[in-house]
Image: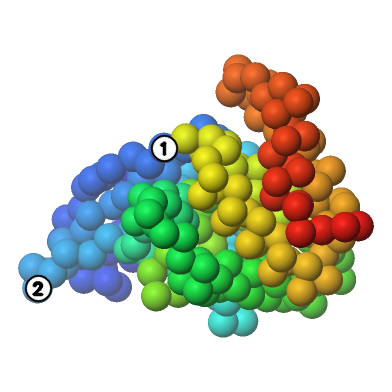
Amino acid sequence: MVIKDEFLSNEKISEYEVEKVFDSKKNTVELIKATKTNGNEVYYVHKILSNHKKMLKEIELLNYLFEKGLDVPKVYYEDEESFLIEYIEGETLLEHITRLEKEQKEKFNYRSNNRLIYKFLNWIEEFYELVKEKTGENIILEDMNLRNFIYTDKLYGFDFEDCHVGNKERDIGRFCAFLLTYSFAFTNWKVRFTRQMLKAVEDYGYDLDLIRKEIDKEFISITKRRGTKIPRSLRDLILGRVFSFYNG
């Protein structure tokens, strides 16, 4: 990759290199290590999108959300086919939740998990409100991969290229389906965490019947994408367990 000379000069960067290529099925995403003239090292994320229209949409949303104060990476510059953003050091939400499950093998930590759940829900609700304020429409994220969130003392979201008009129950349903099926799938801890999250979601006024349908729909999509089988009987069993608190 080639970083613009103007940016290098303004940031006093003497040299840079690709430190790592992130796992991405849709685009090329690189971690850039740069050395400043004073010897300090800084990191950036360079994202190359195959779809120019989606790239422009993502950059526009990132800039808008950053200006509004939502926790998203700062965009430093863009060119014809890529853009450079702030590198947020921390765990992906998937890494964080995986670690929590290991740490809570002996005892489920309701209070700690609740803090994480409400941090996530507060972030996503603010996203919905801000984007509706900008567009006048109910825009959802669609791509609910848990790797699209970085957890530090705050929660940061990114990857907005697939955003479109829809209902937010779809986002929550896909999030829960992803969470439940990451290896190892359908553990007691994952079922309990998902149930705790759905109880919190109910407080925000979400339609739990619709979320249930979206989870089941995503289970079916996951079987096609991953080439694995989630039989109807297993889907019904898991849905019954995570919605055991709900009598709707």
Total labels: the figure holds: 2
Q: Which image quadrant: the C terminus?
A: bottom right
Task: Give how far across and how far down residue 110 sits, in percent.
Answer: 52, 68
- Name which residue type carries label 2: Asn
Query: Is residue 248 shown above or below 1?
Result: below
Task: Give how far across and how far down residue 195 sits, in percent.
Answer: 66, 56
Viewer-closest of 102 and 153: 102
Determine the image quadrant of residue 14.
Answer: bottom left
Q: Is residue 97 visible?
A: yes
- Name which residue type carries label 1: Asp
What number is the disc on residue 23?
1
In the current view of this chain or complex, which residue is farthest to the front?
106
Q: Secondary structure at mark 2?
A: loop
Give me the C-alpha separation between circle 2 and circle 1: 32 Å
Residue linked to disc 2? 38
In-image side of 41 versus 110 (left or right): left
